Amino acid sequence: MKFLTISQIHNLFKRREISVSELTKYYLEKIKKEDKEIGAFLTVCENLAISQAQKLDKELLKLQKLPPLFGIPCAIKDNILVKNLKCTAGSKILQNYIAPYDATVIRKLKEAGAIILGKTNMDEFAMGSSNEYSAFFTTKNPLDKEKVPGGSSGGSAAAIAADFCVFALGSDTGGSVRQPAAFCQIVGFRPTYGAISRFGLIAFSSSLDQIGPMAKTIEDVKIVFDVIRGKDQFDSTSLDVLDEENLDIKNLKIGIPKEYFTETLDAQIKADILFAINKYEKMGAKIEEISLPHTEYALPCYYIIATAEASSNLARFDGIKYGLSKDGKDLFEVYSLTRDLGLGPEVKRRIMLGTFVLSRGYFEEYYVRAQKVRTLIKRDFMEAFKKVDVILTPTSPFFPFKFGERTKDPLAMYLADIYTISAPLASLPAISFPAIKREKFSGSVQLIGKPMEDKKLIKIASFYDSQ
């Protein structure tokens, strides 16, 4: 039963070796016994999962062909709405908020037969790189419980690495699917901006946020992506990605940006990434060094734009409409008491920074300039893609760090995203997977593709898995 993939589970169903209810109860029991030590889940919805499973068992007897995610247990990051379940976004201000409707991705998962086991822990409002900024508790990395699982989708990554579920959904603003995937040695995929509907995702930074699948294998990520992708009438930014091409690895050109291989990159990770590059080359791909000259400005550019959008998006949490509310003598005091008690220090820091860069006298100097730099970063990628099909980089410059190691210095924490933030700024798809399968940690490869070519990118990643 350990570390089963989607296709393996479907084969078990087809051979009638296990029922959906038995499989679901297996995972629920495992969570009950082991998650006290890991802390991957904020909410476990046992009754919902069992009722879904019982319904599917009746259908299993009649079906000749199983839907793509039929009976597959999954976990959902707690900033994605699941009807009638708590959705806290890792924050006390939404501690008792019950979602009134399903996000589009949840509706699609339910229609495809997926079993929702629960909602996973996360950095508050997806602001963090280690899961240490959750308002409730920290999640431990199942591979080394003294280390962080990454963030902000650390709970989803840990749930997969601990084998509490088969796949999970996370959200990626600056790397929050790919970086925890690297820290937990699983696969994480951020699609082209808009390829998956954001309807029902609690907003952090609207021009950067993107829901993405996380799983044990590249094949499973592809299966989940195919189910949840596509245009949505409830999300005007959503779009349809291109179909997969017939690819020959020998015609493939892979770009290696020199800016990602500096002295700040851990020596072991560098060796693992060079191993991956060499592996692709042996398969017949052509390797070419490229330059992305504005990479050094990506980090400040990202944190100006993301915090500016966050300060606007989080204005809705005011103690009036929903969530926590504290009484005051006037409206201003209601706002301030509610936010002071309900929001954590990192969220407050980002709101203040975002409000500052949008304020009169600083808007042009910071926010407008950051948007111009964003255009230059995007232009760098478009120029590179004239020469190569895909870009290969490390996902993270370092391995998972210990709890408390970076929380005292926000800038040190922000550096955890240094290799992942450029893809969101340029609205590009990117996938992370381990370069080498070790018992604990290895460097993870990040492949960045052209916009709309998500299926081609996943196929290129799958070449690596096939050898």
Image (tube, rainbow, N blue to C red):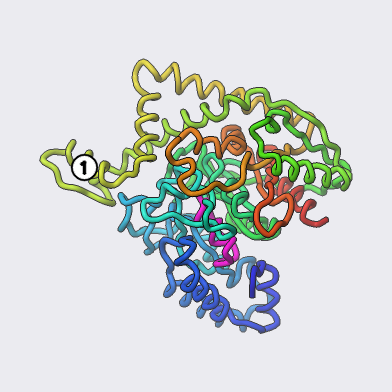
Where residue 282 appears, as percent x and y from the top left, is 88, 46
Q: Give the camera-side residue of 129 and 412.
A: 412
Residue at (52% x, 73% y) in the render: 30
Three-letter amino acid code at the position of disc 1: Leu
* Magenta region, residue range: 153-170
Q: Give the camera-side residue of 300 and 73.
A: 300
Does the stretch in magenta take in 124?
Answer: no
Residue at (77% x, 34% y) in the render: 255
> In the displayed image of the protein, which residue is found farthest to the left?
329
Residue at (43% x, 44% y) in the render: 203
The answer to whether residue 108 is left or right of residue 362 is: right
The answer to whether residue 85 is left or right of residue 236 is: left
Quadrant of the snapshot with the C terminus: bottom right
Does the stretch in magenta take in 162?
Answer: yes
The answer to whether residue 306 is left or right of residue 336 is: right
Where residue 225 appears, as percent x and y from the top left, is 62, 55
Find disc 1 in the rendering and name its residue.
337
| Residue 277 appears anywhere in the view | yes
Q: Is residue 115 above or below residue 370?
A: below
Quadrant of the snapshot with the N terminus: bottom right
Where residue 403 appears, as percent x and y from the top left, is 48, 49
Residue at (75% x, 34% y) in the render: 256
Where residue 202 appears, as percent x and y from the top left, is 42, 48
- Bin the neighbour count of mark 1 within 10 Å (Cα to Cα): few under 14, some 14-19, many 20 and up: some
Q: Give the camera-side residue of 359 and 342.
A: 342
| Residue 233 appears anywhere in the view | no
Q: At numbered mark 1, what does the secondary structure look like: helix, strand or loop?
A: helix
